[in-house]
Image (tube, helix red, strand yellow):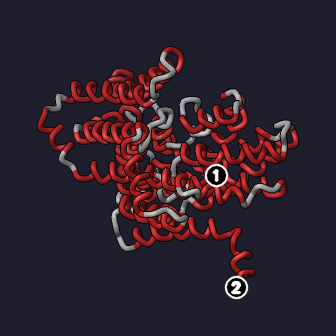
Amino acid sequence: MTELAHSLEPVLPLGKVLFAFGVMLAGLRLRRPLWLSVLAGGFVLAMSFGMSPLQWAGVAAVSLVEPETVFLILIMALILFFSEVLEKSGQTRRLMQAATGFLGDPRFRLAFFPALVGFLPMPGGAVFSAPLVRDMADELGLARRDTALVNYWFRHLWELCWPLYPGIILASSLAGVPLARVIAATSPCILLCALLGWAFIMRPAVAHLAGAPQGQRPPRDWRAALREGLPMLIAIGCGLGFEVGMTLFAPDLPFELGIMAALVLAIVCSLFQNKVGPGFVAGVLADRELYRLVALVVSVLVFKDVLQASGAVGQLARQGAGPGALFALTLALPFLVGFISGITVAFVGATVPIILGVLHTVDPAGAQLMPHLTLALFSGFTGVMVSPLHVCFVLSCQFFGTDLGQAWRRLLAPCALLLACGVGWFFVLAALG
């Protein structure tokens, strides 16, 4: 019996984590609220790794008052409010009609708005682009599941390469590597994501349009496009500008403040343009969906903190402390944490320090630092993209009213190829290093 327990010891941490994830999936299968399923999975994880209910409650309570959680809640609320104003005022439809004159191919029009919003690193940003994508997709007769996937996938083209995303900034800081060098190593991800999204998501979604008449494209109207797109331009342009300005002149301030300020300005602009009154504002604040989405964000962040506080990540890492296991550790650990948290910052903050510590014992000179860091980022990002707990994925499925499980299965093939390409890129960098 002792020998059996000893032989199972290396896989026990992984088994406990997978069991907690199974609890979450069971909750979804029973049609329990997603936020409640995530909390239940975090509680099971905590108990299986030796935490008491009181300790779990303490970690949860601390998560609720952390600045990161507060900022995410406020940003999410602003995004949802902004989306409601644009949608209910008809501005999203007017913007789509104006953009049609500049983007002739309907596939480009579908991918354009989520990719544009992707330049602004905001949690739940898929909600921002969803109304725009929906209006265009409805005119083209796309299935809601395909529309949700298009909105989700093309929203994340830039996450490993855009210098304002917190995950890539954190990875650069932890590794002590210049941000430009990290981006140079991860830049193939943009082309890979675009090609995979085009082949596995966009092409099947618009297959029924092959040979069909595209209709007459409206004339190009720069004034209409700028007028209707002004709130979104303010949100994206000011968000990027405020972040760069804060990085240069106020580096101690949280970057989220810049995003929040930009969203407030965009909301004021859209309210002014559409002459929306106090009654509309009160109606949005009374919407139960707003609070369900906020609860989801909170539950995911609580789960991330429980994952770290329980020692689950540390126990998983100890199984890969040998030189022969370093590659497997770098491949598996970020993917696993990204998959069960759905947050890029979570896998970077939880696993990159562990990988760097093991790497230092195996390669003190640091010759293989960039290949392993790049592999960790590719692996973790793939886990985030295929995670059923990814906030953008859940929000896209909920917005378009599509079954989460059916949509998730469509992500398996492109994500598997993305990870395989990341492994291939690792060996290229290792050979060049």
Q: Is residue 120 above or below residue 199?
A: above
Find residue 334 and name its label: 1
Residue 220 placement: quadrant: top left
Relative placement, left or right, of 46 versus 86 is right
Where disc 1 sits, the SS reads: helix
Give the residue displayed 62% in from the left and 46% down from the top.
193
Q: Earlier in the sequence, mark 1 or mark 2?
A: 2
Task: Inspect the image, locate mark 1, and give the three-letter code of the amino acid beneath it.
Answer: Pro
Mark 1 Cα-neighbour bin, 10 Å: few <14, some 14–19, many ≥20: many
Give the residue displayed 44% in from the left and 37% down from the top.
122
Find residue 20 and name its label: none
Q: Outermost residue, top direction?
A: 249
Relative placement, left or right, of 274 versus 386 is left
Q: Nearer the viewer, residue 189 or 327?
A: 327
Q: Outermost residue, right direction?
A: 431
Relative placement, left or right, of 120 versus 261 is right
Asked whether residue 200 is in view, the answer is: no
Tell me the residue that label 2 is attached to.
1
Task: Inspect the image, locate mark 2, and give the three-letter code of the amino acid beneath it.
Answer: Met
Tell me the quarter of the image containing the N terminus. Answer: bottom right
